Amino acid sequence: MWRVEPLRLVLLFVHLIGFALLLGGAITQYLTGRLKINSAMLWGAAIQVLTGVGLSAPLRDGHEPSPAKLATKLVLGLMIFAMVFFSRKREAVNRGHFLAIIGLTLLNAGVAVFWR
Ligand code: HEM
């Protein structure tokens, strides 16, 4: 379905920018030694859920990713968003909480790439 292909590509492009904001924001913050949720992480997590839901629409002319893959990505994405959103005003979060955000982000990128 060629008419929706540009829409899918724009959503994928913004999805990758959200990934860069979330992972880049988290690693940069981690390297400062102060484990605070920064706004790049917050925007990145929100962009991932919004563009991810858009990318889950049937835009591929029948060659859709499996519903199990999409459900896994959605659950992981919502977990990351909750972990970022509800801690956004804290001066610092636990190291385990911060590393879990990074780990779940990497896991969700792995699900996107390796689950075919
Ligand atoms: C932190 C959260 C997320 C990360 C790091 C992430 C990462 C990625 C990456 C790197 C890709 C590109 C894969 C490729 O083109 O080969 C991708 C694609 C995709 N993502 Fe996400 N994503 C996240 C959240 C979500 C959420 C919440 C959804 C909603 C269900 C979602 C749905 C999708 C879909 C449908 C694709 C296209 C997959 C395909 O064509 O097989 N993502 N994601």
Image (spheres, helix red, strand yellow):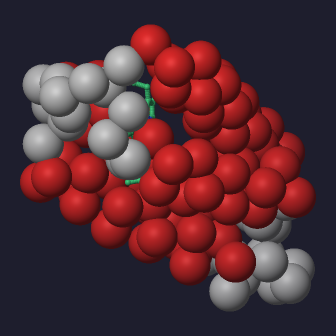
Residue 86 found in image quarter = bottom right
Q: Residue at x 70, y 77 (%)?
A: 85
Residue 65, position in %: x, y? 20, 36
Q: Residue furthest top?
A: 2
Residue 13, position in %: x, y? 64, 23
> In the image, is 104 to the left or to the right of 37?
left
Q: Residue at x 33, y 67 (%)?
A: 75
The tally of labels here is 0
Q: Nearer the viewer, residue 34 or 11?
A: 11
Taking the image as drawn, is residue 13 in sight? yes
Q: Is residue 82 above or below residue 99?
A: below
Residue 93 found in image quarter = bottom right
Q: Residue at x 18, y 47 (%)?
A: 69
Ligand 1 - quadrant of the structure image: top left
Q: Nearer the viewer, residue 11 or 7?
A: 7
Q: Residue at x 38, y 33 (%)?
A: 59
Taking the image as drawn, is residue 110 in sight? no
> In the image, is 22 to the left or to the right of 80?
right
Where is the C terminus found, in terms of image quarters?
A: top left
Residue 71, position in %: x, y? 23, 60
Residue 10 found in image quarter = top right
Q: Is residue 76 above or below residue 87?
A: above
Where is the N terminus found, in terms of image quarters?
A: top left
Q: Is residue 49 above or below residue 63?
A: below
